[in-house]
Image: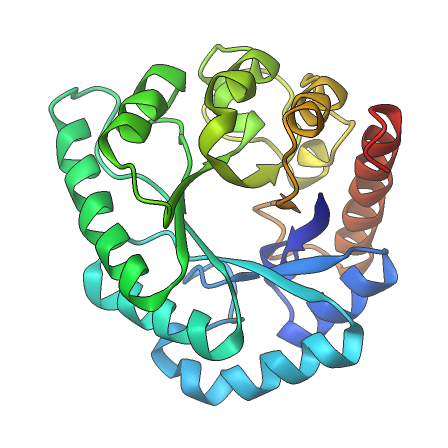
Amino acid sequence: MKVGANSVLFGGYDMETAFKYLAMAGYDGIELSAIDGMSEHLVLARWQEVAPQIKQLARDYNLELLAMEQPSRDKEIMEKAMQAAVEIGIPIINCGPGGSDKDESTLQGTIDELGELTVMAEKYGVTLCVKAHVGRAIFNTPTTLKVMEAISSPNFGIDMDPSHIHRADENPVEAIAAVISRVKHVHIRDCKGRQHGPGKPEDQANGRGDIDLVGYIRVLHENGYTGPLDLEIIGAKEYAIEQCCTIAAESRGHMQACLQACGAR
């Protein structure tokens, strides 16, 4: 597995700051945040301008470009994301589902949207991934399985985030085993409790919460998963750089220990 982190952890700082400190913490790669409002990193409205800088930063800091997170399913925005991914050399684009867990009828609409975007992903030669998200139409294992059944393209995959599954009152270790055949990306973070949000950034750091991340990573390893394992910490935009670096380093150490515990490293 390739250990990376989403640059959104350093959303209050410029892109080079994220590259610099994630490299210092020992990460293998980086997932670029294209999340409006949470960062000014891969800004898709001017991706042609930032693409050369991103490629140079990857070389300078020896970080593999593992993925991009672009939550919108808007076709125009997603096409820009895919064009940027091809130019920069990013293989995976992670998005979130739409709809609502309070309205079952929105699940089919979400599946239809993702199906159309998958056709676009085939055109550009990238992989589109979606994750179960608290409050959305895809929010747990049963709804994830329905999407897997509906979209069979090799350019579509599941992005698994144990914190969302945990907050859907499921066991993330059992959940990852149920969908592992289509998992192509993993967003990883911890979580205390089963409230709607993921909690304070420091409580999302791996090892700080209630999730069995050792067991979760063991299932990935035992099933031959070799893709990205990207830390995703949200809510730290106003944090001091020392706080962001502490969260990054602590989580990287925990991931390394998990990988060693299950024989993956």
- In the displayed structure image, the side of residue 241 where residue 77 appears, left or right: left
Q: Position of residue 68 (x, y in %)?
A: 50, 59
- In the displayed structure image, the side of residue 189 where residue 88 appears, left or right: left
Quarter of the rendering occupied by the C terminus: top right
Q: Is residue 230 above or below residue 82?
A: above
Q: Position of residue 49 (x, y in %)?
A: 46, 89
Q: Position of residue 117 (x, y in %)?
A: 24, 53
Q: Nearer the viewer, residue 209 or 217?
A: 217
Q: Residue at x 77, y 60 (%)?
A: 22
Q: Residue at x 22, y 55 (%)?
A: 119
Res 14 visible: no
Q: Nearer the viewer, residue 93 or 198?
A: 93
Colouring convention used in this rendered image of the protein:
rainbow
Q: Is residue 226 above or below residue 148?
A: below
Q: Residue at x 73, y 36 (%)?
A: 205
Quarter of the rendering occupied by the N terminus: top right
Q: Is residue 160 above or below residue 193?
A: below
Q: Residue at x 67, y 84 (%)?
A: 56
Res 230 visible: yes
Q: Nearer the viewer, residue 12 or 17?
A: 17
Residue 191's image quarter?
Answer: top right
Residue 212's image quarter?
Answer: top right
Q: How many marks?
A: 0
- In the displayed structure image, the side of residue 10 where residue 73 appears, left or right: left
